[in-house]
Amino acid sequence: MCQHILPEWWEVINVKRDIIKVKKGQKFIEEGSKREGVFFIQDGFVKVHKHWGEREMIVRFAKKGEIVGHRGISAENMHSPISATAMQDSVLCFVELDFFKTLLKANISLSYELMMFYADELQWSEQKMGSFIHLSVKERFVINLNYLIKHFGLDESNTLQIELSKTEMAAYIGTTYETMYRVIAEMENADILTFSGKQIEIISLTKLQAQALS
């Protein structure tokens, strides 16, 4: 937000925004609750999720510098369509919805960047939902893991720079824990990756990318 506003708005934002610290596992947006504003992640890592029948579906993960709560911006629906929970201790910048809308009207660059963000997110969401119908669990896992690698990166030991459990990965690609466990075991046996605790280490990025093309 602060990267794409006119300088004269900086002082107003400092007055209007709230800096909120949330603990790991703390939910700061509740699905179905009255939408109040948007959050920008200043530090940490969160998941955006919602109910899918009786199961939880993880819609996306968000990192430092990204926005959460924008799905609640609507002219008609006054309630949040998603929940959001911190996956590690995080620092959030909260801006009330009416003020954020004022910022969008007055700052063309911010409006443009948000529109581009919506477009990219919609494209990925459509691709992801289409994969639920047309692709196997293994194919979905490979595609989404490659996306997470591109989005969050690998450290010097080729370990994904976010921690995810098998249960969370299953919720992200839309399958059960048991099926996720079998797919991961198969890829571990093929020396493609190792999944230890919540850490995913990529043994062969070439083999992983080849799986996405096969």
Image (cartoon, rainbow, N blue to C red):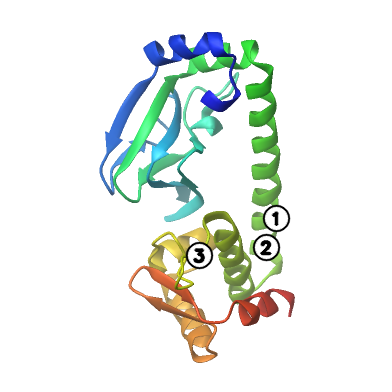
Which residue matches tag 2?
131
Please say if 133 is above or below 196: above
For the point 71% across and 67% down, the residue is: 134
Give the left or right position of residue 100, taking residue 108 as reference.
left
For the point 54% across and 31% down, the residue is: 70
Residue furthest to the bottom: 189
Please say if 98 is above or below 28: above
Which residue matches tag 3?
154
Q: Which comes before the other along the chain, label 1 or label 3?
A: 1
Residue kind at label 1, given as amino acid type: Gln
Q: Position of residue 11 (x, y in %)?
A: 44, 10
Q: Position of residue 110 (x, y in %)?
A: 63, 23
For the point 41% across and 46% down, the residue is: 46
Q: Which of the 4 quarters of the picture holds residue 95?
A: top left
Which quarter shows the C terminus?
Answer: bottom right
What is the tally of numbered marks visible in this picture? 3
Q: Position of residue 144 (x, y in %)?
A: 59, 63
Q: Residues within 10 Å of mark 2 (few under 14, many from 20)?
A: some
Residue kind at label 3, given as amino acid type: Leu
Which residue matches tag 1?
127
| Secondary structure beneath label 2 | helix
Give the left or right position of residue 44, taking residue 208 as reference.
left
For the point 52% across and 56% down, the residue is: 152
| Secondary structure beneath label 3 | loop
